[in-house]
Amino acid sequence: MIKPIMTNHLFLARPSEPASPSDAPTAQDLLDTLAAHSHECVGMAANMIGMLKRIIAFDDEGTYRIMYNPEIVSRAGEYAADEGCLSLAGRRPVTRYRTIKVRYQDAEFREKTKTYTGWTAQIIQHEIDHCDGIVV
Ligand SMILES: [Zn+2]
């Protein structure tokens, strides 16, 4: 189900709680909402639809993916970027890493560890920040 976009800064600044398999409906809502905003948005975290759970959805080079409880376990290649966010007006400077290794549970809640680089890595970093209550 497509959900309204949360723009309340106080809500977005709250860290999200660990997700469990019972949060699958929230993951589906996140995918539906991301798809509805595909012209302006490449990734979303569950708090952007009002759910304080550690779930992100993002465009992985043309395929939408879900990660439950994503965690960056290593990072390399620091660079400066500027990013916008569907929940906030304007763009802001941020520090990102070209290569990240992420541990997460996939859409079927299987434990995974995967390395991402470049644009997809940048999207994931932005969405994990949302899970931590960091708003760009
Ligand atoms: Zn954002």
Image (cartoon, rainbow, N blue to C red):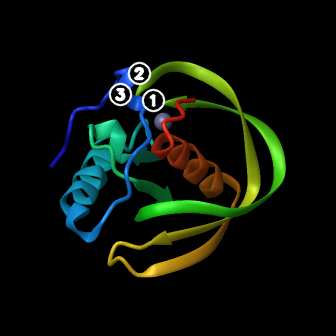
In the image, which disc is placed on residue 11? 3
The reply, left or right, for residue 10 in relation to residue 103 is left
Above-or-below relation of 111 to 134: below
Above-or-below relation of 3 to 56: above
Q: Secondary structure at mark 3?
A: helix
Out of 108 and 90, give the one closest to the viewer: 108
Q: Is residue 125 visible?
A: yes
The amino acid pointed to by label 3 is Phe
Which residue has dot 1 on it? 13
The amino acid pointed to by label 1 is Ala
The reply, left or right, for residue 63 in relation to residue 75 is left
Out of 104 and 37, give the one closest to the viewer: 104
Out of 88 and 105, give the one closest to the viewer: 105
Marks 3/1 in contact by CB < 8 Å: the verdict is: yes
Q: Quadrant of residue 80?
A: top right
Q: Secondary structure at mark 1?
A: loop
Tell me the quadrant of the picture where the C terminus can be found.
top right
Crowding around mark 1 (Cα neighbors within 10 Å: few <14, some 14 to 19, many 20+) is some
The amino acid pointed to by label 2 is His
Out of 12 and 2, give the one closest to the viewer: 12
Expressed as whole percent of the image width and height from the top left, the position of residue 12 reads: 40, 30
Marks 2/3 in contact by CB < 8 Å: the verdict is: yes
Crowding around mark 2 (Cα neighbors within 10 Å: few <14, some 14 to 19, many 20+) is few
Which residue has dot 2 on it? 9
Look at 64% across and 23% down and name the residue there.
Answer: 92
Marks 2/1 in contact by CB < 8 Å: the verdict is: yes
In the image, which disc is placed on residue 106? none
